[in-house]
Amino acid sequence: MTRIRRCSTVGLAAIVASVAMGCGTADTTESPLEAALSSIALDDYTTHIRTLSSDELEGRGPSSPGEEKTIAYLKDAFEGMGLSPGNGDSFFQEVPLVSITAEPDAVLGIRGSDGTEELVYGDDFMAWTKRVRDEVEIDDSELVFVGYGIVAPEYDWNDYEGLDVEGKTVVILVNDPGFATQDTMLFSGNAMTYYGRWTYKYEEAARQGAAGALVVHETEPAAYPWGTVKNSWSGEQFDLVTADDNMSRVAIEGWLTIESARALFDRAGLDFDALKAEALKPDFEPVSMGLTASLKLENAVRRSTSNNVLAVLPGTDRADEYFVYMAHWDHLGRDESLSGDQIYNGALDNATGTAALLELAEAFASLEEAPSRSVLFLAVTAEEQGLLGSAFYATNPVVAPEKTVAALNMDGMNVIGPMRDITIIGYGNSELDAYLAEVAEAEGRTIRPDPEAEAGYYYRSDHFNFAKAGIPALYPDEGVDHVEHGEEWSQARRDAYRAERYHKPTDEFNEEWDLTGAIDDIRLYFQVGYRIANESTFPNWREGTEFKATRDAMMEGG
């Protein structure tokens, strides 16, 4: 029997060759590593995607009959591979959730000296609450424009300076000043920082004591159209259970369409574009709009339990150290208020990533000898509801953070064919980049930074919760330079997906997909994890990255 011999000082292409040669001993049989790579098969991968995105699984909504079917499928698959339960004797980690469904007939009343105008839910605005209450409201809450709504001491920036927003509703621009100016000396230029994310803006508004927070939607800086906002924030909205039932959050969170926002500014006698320009300056001063907002949300509240799914391949001599592969299994479920197709199948987002997780698990399970370190396969819940499953895991880890060597996240795989390159979201953040670059180079492929850094994708998937906990996390994405058709063709298809299918019932399995590019990528991801699982080193964050101090302190303490 050919055994894997660790040769961790050489590259992955060399590892494959050295295993076949026994690190110096001639052997013409297929190596265990090569066999594992070959087990990542197009037919199996396609079958997993078809099943996970089928109508039978009802859109994989958390705490739904669709969840029960989905997690059973994942457990059976992991168990059938011979993997061990990842949470003691269980393949599941319970995640306590609370869901709030607002009645869709709510109206946002805007009162001024000329009377009251009512904005229509879904068409003019979207709003919800994180507070676990049957009813929440704001009543004649003063509207205040606070620019980008950012407090960032490291940039000497405070949009709330000198402002008391107690009981008021803040109106906020999406993204951050760097994107608007493309000035690399302002925040991170074109690349969105966390300050540009809507999640941060609501969090900061709550810290400031605001009653409500409304973000102005614009497609380019938000990186998705209004239809995505409408679909994502209507219906049942989930959150983690907290001790204070989220009473520390603002009462009302929401979005305004750009059209309704402009109309409000016009009504207030304010020049929206001029104020946007002023908001790009660190000495910007908030502006009271001379209008008030009233909104009552009547909610159906439901407490439930969802599940992360975990499986482990135990390591040999460093079994207490873990490399983690992760993907979110959930999507948006079923919306019975829709006419026609009511199921958000989530084929690309993220049946493709979950299926990749299963293929990687099968490849590692097929090894004749397990790696030195253990490998954890983590399928998390409620990503679409705000990265909730990974947030719960990060604060309730099965594996101690100081023993979690690194993680690799998969969220939306390549469905358009082979690429000359591969993208790293958050390129330059950690030493993990070099691992992927090395195996890609051996396949004749190049690494490139995120071509859409302005969209803030680094803060929009589950690896981010690992990063916040200090754990180095790699988030690769499909390349953009198609082997046959080039970059423009590839980007056009990415744009079409975002506009026509992202978070819509139309994200369904497509017989015309070319999944061979996904198989290429999964094999690269296998090699990255295989190498790290057979090393003794701990990859770290790069100097200057905001997560490095947390990791360094953790490892010193560990």
Image (cartoon, helix red, strand yellow):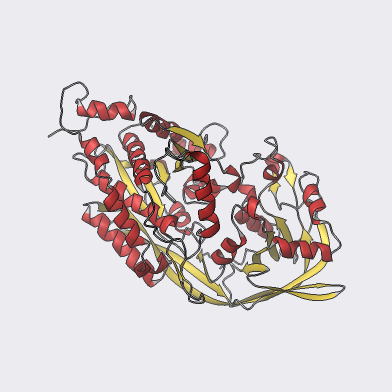
Image location (x, y in percent) of residue 227: 58, 63
Q: Is residue 543 above or below residue 206?
A: above
Q: Is residue 539 above or below residue 490?
A: above
Which quadrant holds the C terminus? top left
Image location (x, y in percent) of residue 241: 50, 65
Q: Is residue 338 left or right of residue 367?
A: right
Q: Is residue 97 above or below residue 542?
A: below
Q: Is residue 348 left or right of residue 195?
A: left
Q: Is residue 280 above or below residue 8?
A: below
Q: Is residue 304 left or right of residue 201?
A: left
Which quadrant holds the N terminus? top left
Q: Quadrant of residue 168?
A: bottom right
Q: Quadrant of residue 117?
A: bottom right
Q: Is residue 261 left or right of residue 287?
A: left
Instruction: Say if residue 467 shows up in the picture.
Output: yes
Furthest residue to the top? 24
Q: Residue at x 22, y 29 (%)?
A: 19
Furthest residue to the left? 1
Q: Residue at x 63, y 78 (%)?
A: 105
Closer-to-camera residue (534/181): 181
Image location (x, y in percent) of residue 297: 63, 75
Furthest residue to the front? 485
Q: Residue at x 57, y 44 (%)?
A: 452
